[in-house]
Amino acid sequence: MRRAGVAALALVALLTVAGCGGSDGDQVEQRTLTVFAAASLTSTFTELAERFEAEHEGVEVRLSFGGSSDLAAQIAEGAPADVFAAADEQTMARVTGASDAALAPEVFATNTLQIATPADAPDRVRDLADLADPALKVVLCAPQVPCGAATRTLLAKNALDVEPVSEEQSVTDVLGKVTSGEADAGVVYRTDVIGAGDTVRGVDAARAGEVVNRYPVVALDDGEPAGAFVRFVTSGAGREILVAAGFGTP
């Protein structure tokens, strides 16, 4: 009985030591990094997050994508975001102007608008002016969304009045309407057309080069790994991923 009791105590001690782990140098701090990013960054930030996790042991990156204006509103209401990447500087200002951002926003990419039509649809859209045809079902981003604000600026530059059948809260929603056949055309970013592959046909829009969206990113947490993630996005490695997806450099 006595020997059994001693053996049991020894086992408990062994399990306790094992549960504590090795030396401090062997322990890895588990951290969750929450990143809010514009919908047009979905594919690139997914790749960036995977690369970042591979290079930062113990860090899990949780991504939340959506319309930049919706994400900014969530952050203003207290949503726990560590990093925010917006599709334009005006939307970013709503966040950094209302909070103590750890770092000043840094522009890391640019994007321009392009018309998307279903790949198998008749060739009815050859320029931006064709979107004014009332017989066409055109979908645009809502005016308060960066892609929507840019679209209105582009239409104004071309003196065009386009009546959309719907206004969406994110550029991915516009693209979804086009790829599903619910719309004959939609104005999205060039990167969205590239990312959609052969499901859509891209049509250049007149004077699109005069309306450029500048994408800023900021760390909302003054610690790591938020700052490290921002540095990675703006690094040469991050820029390579963005350029491969069709983004321009600032």
Image (cartoon, grey):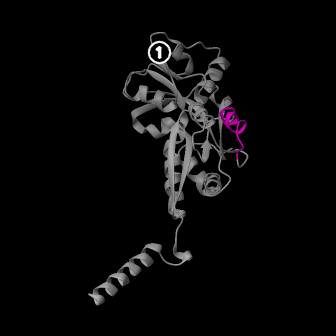
Q: Nearer the viewer, residue 183 or 47?
A: 47
Q: Name above or below for residue 107 compared with residue 32.
A: above
Q: Which quadrant holds the N terminus?
A: bottom left
Q: Position of residue 92 (x, y in %)?
A: 67, 37
Q: Residue furthest bottom?
A: 3
Tell me the residue that label 1 is attached to: 165
Q: Amino acid at mark 1?
A: Val
Which type of secondary structure does the marked residue at label 1 adopt? Answer: loop
Q: Nearer the viewer, residue 57 or 243?
A: 57
Q: Name above or below for residue 33 compared with residue 152.
A: below
Reply yes or no: does residue 94 show up in magenta.
Answer: yes
Q: Is residue 74 left or right of residue 20?
A: right
Q: Position of residue 98 (x, y in %)?
A: 71, 36
Q: Residue furthest front?
A: 1
Q: Nearer the viewer, residue 213 or 25?
A: 25
Q: Which picture quadrant has residue 94?
A: top right
* Residue displayed at 39% across by 77% down: 15
Tell me which segment is drawn in magenta. Answer: 90-101
**Within-10-Å neighbours for mark 1: few <14, some 14–19, many 20+:** few
* Residue displayed at 63% across by 35% down: 76
